[in-house]
Image (cartoon, rainbow, N blue to C red):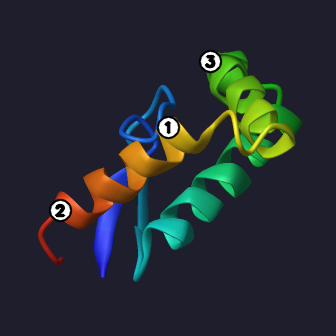
Amino acid sequence: MKTMTCRQLGGPCDLAHRGETHDDVINAQDQHLKQAEKDGDAAHQPARDEMKSRWRHPKKSLGWYREMKQAFADLPED
């Protein structure tokens, strides 16, 4: 199990997301940003917009995905 924060994943806060894989924390971040948007949290809106763009254009976003995959791999186990 490893932990990445919203900020490490491109967001504005330090909410921790824990997961066994990088996909776990990326999906947790996606849910966090969706909830922040629903709650009207303007600070998270730019990150939410970027996340929506990544899901719509996955080939274009492979660089970000690979960066997050490597950042997750480089983290120590919790």
User: Is 75 on the left or on the right of 55, as rendered?
Assistant: left
> Quadrant of residue 43 in the image?
top right
On residue 2, the disc is none
Rendered location of residue 39, percent (x, y): 82, 36
How many labels were placed on the picture? 3
Rendered location of residue 10, percent (x, y): 48, 31
Q: Nearest to the eye among marks 2 and 1: give it.
A: 1
In terms of sequence position, does the residue under pointer 1 or pointer 3 come before the other?
3
Q: Is residue 41 above or below residue 56?
A: above
Please name the residue that numbered disc 2 is placed on: 75
- The residue that appears at 38% across and 44% down in the rendered structure is 67
CA distance for labels 2 and 1: 19 Å
Query: Badges 3 and 2: C-beta atoms under 8 Å apart?
Result: no
Q: Identify residue type, mark 1.
A: Gly
- The residue that appears at 44% across and 33% down in the rendered structure is 13
* Helix, strand or loop under label 1: helix
* Helix, strand or loop under label 2: loop
CA distance for labels 1 and 3: 24 Å
Q: Identify residue type, mark 2.
A: Leu
Question: Callout 3 environment at 10 Å: few (<14), some (14 to 19), or many (20+)?
Answer: few
Q: Nearest to the eye among marks 3 and 2: give it.
A: 2
Please name the residue that numbered disc 3 is placed on: 43
Q: Is residue 15 visible?
A: no
> Quadrant of residue 26 in the image?
bottom right
CA distance for labels 3 and 2: 26 Å
Please name the residue that numbered disc 1 is placed on: 63
